[in-house]
Image (cartoon, grey):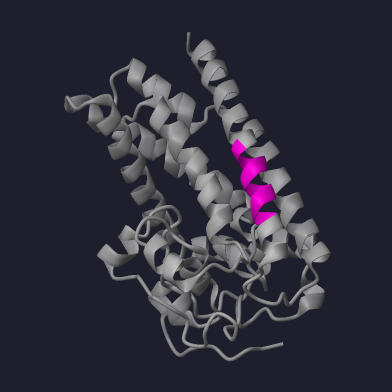
């Protein structure tokens, strides 16, 4: 019975997420070409090869290593009456909304944790070592971080007990907003100010990729911007402005190192710098 549940939700989720990924990725790629927000530091072809190979590898790896994904876990939890939502009688539409919101909170807290614990920061700095931020950066994470993140989602699903539909919506939206809010795209300032009350915008999240420590440790949200405002981690704009800010990490500025193998082994050889939240200090100075 469980095998049939897994295969049913697996095929449906994979199709939906695949279609959404292709559509959003294509739209963002065209938008970045038509109206870029910043001039790129590294040649795009070089960066994209590294980032896209990591993305493809992670997608294949996670299917092989982890036998059950969050959507299938939600189906199992529902079948066995697990999770907090099982104790409340609310309309299905409201239950889906509540589940999506709290799953997003779990990802916000996970993101903060990856900036807090030095061991987790070593994994997460692969994402921040990108010297430019664009649509591919939104999916550039070390394979071990992807595995840990999947287990966090599985645990959150067990605790919350969401309808599988809510998990499909959440996973699809998370994938799409990660590409959107990392986009190197321009939009009218008035539109950005309005939109960032609803969703994390590229200008809002780009602050998080600043070389400045205080700016790196802000704007942790992926989908919804509310958690940063509620938890005091919101920062409106980078001190140097979006065109003048430096992207990446102070200790890794050598473009020649920028390759696939280096990105994969970086957590094991990394100089973590002073970026972990519990090691706040002076703002770094760029080092070649």
**Residue in front for this viewpoint, 230 or 114:** 230
Look at the image and say whether residue 52 sits in the magenta stretch. Answer: no
**Location of residue 272 (image quadrant):** bottom right
At horizontal 44% and vertical 60% (from top left) the residue drawn is: 200
Spot occupied by residue 92 in the image (x, y as percentages of width and height) = 28, 25
Question: Is residue 136 something that shows in the picture?
Answer: no
Query: Is 160 positioned to the left or the right of 63 in the image?
Result: left
Query: Is 210 positioned to the left or the right of 65 in the image?
Result: left
Look at the image and say whether residue 26 sits in the magenta stretch. Answer: yes
Spot occupied by residue 20 in the image (x, y as percentages of width and height) = 60, 38
**Location of residue 132 (image quadrant):** bottom right
Q: Which residues are magenta?
A: 20-29
At horizontal 49% and vertical 46% (from top left) the residue drawn is: 174
**Residue in front for this viewpoint, 34 or 122:** 34
At horizontal 45% and vertical 78% (from top left) the residue drawn is: 215
**Location of residue 230 (image quadrant):** bottom left
- Please, is residue 172 above or below residue 80 in the view? below
Main SS, magenta region, reads helix
- Please, is residue 283 above or below residue 262 in the view? below
**How many discs appear?**
0
**Residue in front for this viewpoint, 269 or 102:** 102
């Amino acid at each position: 019975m469980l095998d049939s549940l897994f295969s049913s939700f697996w095929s449906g989720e994979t199709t939906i997420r695949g279609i959404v990924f292709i559509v959003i990725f294509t739209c963002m790629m065209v938008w970045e070409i038509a109206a870029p927000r910043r001039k790129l530091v590294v040649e795009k072809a070089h960066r994209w090869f590294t980032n896209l190979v990591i993305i493809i590898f992670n997608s294949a790896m996670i299917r092989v290593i982890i036998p059950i994904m969050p959507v299938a876990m939600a189906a199992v939890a529902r079948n066995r009456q697990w999770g907090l939502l099982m104790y409340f009688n609310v309309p299905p539409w409201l239950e889906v909304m509540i589940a999506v919101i709290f799953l997003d909170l779990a990802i916000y807290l996970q993101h903060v944790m990856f900036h807090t614990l030095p061991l987790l920061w070593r994994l997460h700095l692969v994402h921040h070592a990108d010297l430019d931020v664009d649509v591919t950066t939104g999916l550039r994470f070390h394979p071990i971080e992807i595995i840990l993140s999947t287990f966090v989602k599985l645990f959150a699903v067990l605790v919350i007990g969401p309808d599988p539909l809510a998990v499909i919506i959440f996973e699809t939206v998370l994938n799409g907003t990660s590409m959107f809010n990392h986009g190197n795209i321009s939009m009218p300032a008035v539109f950005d100010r309005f939109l960032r009350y609803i969703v994390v915008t590229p200008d809002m999240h780009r602050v998080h990729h600043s070389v400045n420590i205080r700016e790196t440790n802000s704007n942790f949200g992926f989908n919804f911007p509310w958690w940063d405002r509620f938890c005091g981690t919101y920062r409106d704009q980078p001190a140097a402005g979006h065109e003048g800010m430096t992207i990446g990490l102070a200790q890794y500025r050598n473009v020649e190192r920028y390759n696939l193998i280096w990105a994969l082994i970086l957590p094991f050889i990394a100089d973590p710098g002073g970026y972990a939240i519990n090691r706040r200090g002076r703002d770094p100075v760029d080092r070649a």
